[in-house]
Amino acid sequence: MKKTLTILGMSALILLGTACSNDDDNNIGSNTRKDIQLTRTEQEMVGANNDFAFNFYNQLNTHVGEHNMMVSPLSLAQALSMLANGADGNTKTELMNMLGFGAYSVEEMNAYYMNLNKGLLSADKTSKIALANSFWINNRYTAIDSYKKTLQNSYDAEVQELPFDNTICAKINQWAEENTYGCIKKVVNESDINSNTVMALLNATYFKGIWKDKFKEKNSFKGNFTAPDKSSFVEYMKQESFEANVYEDKDCKLIELPYGNEAFSMVVILPNEELSLDELTQSVDADRWQGWMKQLSLHTNVLLQLPKFTGEYEYNDNLKNTLKEMGIVDAFSAIDADFSQMTETQVFVNCIKQSSFIEVNEEGTEAAAVVYIGENVSDSGMKVFEFKATRPFFYAIKEKSTNAILFMGKVTNPKE
């Protein structure tokens, strides 16, 4: 009988002053922005990664419906990339194609993530970012040495070989909590890991950023937000007469809100009233995203209203179904899965989850995600550019020099 493999992803995003963690913000330090240096091939792979991000977001959104959503495509992609390193045959082909890396080798993919992660970690010392990977092995089984070394060298992964007894869930959850600074405390329960579970792959992505231009609490106010089912009375943050990069076309308005030294920013996209949020996001791919980022330009007189929002999300069956719909089939099959580059034991993916957290307030943003995989037109001059997010909107947190997306989501009701 084939044994099982588990994949877990966690993302925590904190854009705020109040954080899950007890870390001292004064220790974050300060520095000038440091752009990420990638090869031409790796720059192309950012586009492939962002295409995966929008494909994943839109497909998962068909399961989420009108609810709020937040995911980390970066966290999921890295967990699946580690999985692809252990795959062979059609299982590997499906994983690489779905990730957008079908035209690249596994070695090129590994080099890309190694360089991207290194750049993300050093881009801005005024923000806190953590990227952590781990590979857990049931000590009744063995993993191929070359696979373990690849994860350690290319993904800086911790390798844990230990009994999968009644303490394993607590140990994995402790790892998740520590690597998301307390934002995500539980990613796995006893039903996710059983005696047939051979191995588990985890990725944790955490970001905490303080707005470059903080919102003043005295300007916050309560007002109506038009949700899909009904209007709600929510708390808004407000900025007036400030500078921001903005863009507007026939479909939507965009505004970029930077953190710290501007290496990272939140891009908020508000569809025009004639267009639903889902209609807009379904039309977005990496090329349109890149075009928008190039067309953002500085406006010196901006009025911004943005609701405060927070959320904790977990995607389990929806995530598994989404990935199947995107083309990953063999990996979930007890008959067809081929992970012979990972272990000599016949395994398949029986569990894949992403847990995520986000909080946005006047000070900034905090976000986190954990992925678990287991086997068994801008204006100028002084005219006011108004950006009032009083209806459903999309947001993404990205790195400036590459436009790589770390987190993305939508707010359909700030009080949900």
Image (spheres, grey):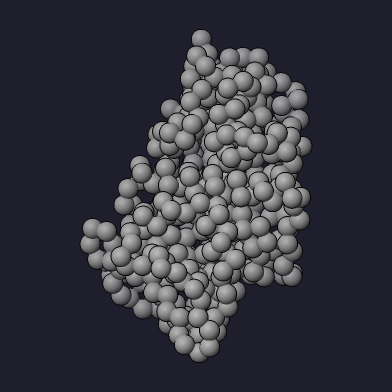
At 55% from the left edge and 29% from the top edge, which residue is drawn? 94
Q: Can see residue 363?
A: no
Q: Nearer the viewer, residue 325 or 44?
A: 44
Is 289 placed above or below 236 here?
above
Q: Nearer the viewer, residue 311 or 253?
A: 253
- Count all numbered tags in the image, as a single digit: 0
Q: Nearer the viewer, residue 364 or 169?
A: 364
At 48% from the left edge and 26% from the top edge, which residue is drawn? 329
Residue 206: x, y in percent? 59, 52
Q: Can see residue 349?
A: yes
Most extreme residue toward the bottom is 382
Residue 263: x, y in percent? 66, 65
| Image quadrant in which you'd find residue 98 | top right
**Quarter that holds the C terminus:** bottom left
Most extreme residue toward the left is 230
Is 43 placed above or below 258 here?
above
Is 171 placed above or below 307 here?
above
Describe residue 221's horizontal placement relative to residue 124 as left or right: left
Q: Nearer the viewer, residue 7 or 24?
A: 7
Describe residue 324's horizontal placement relative to residue 160 as left or right: left
Residue 387: x, y in percent? 42, 75
Most extreme residue toward the top is 1
Is 262 placed above or below 239 here?
above
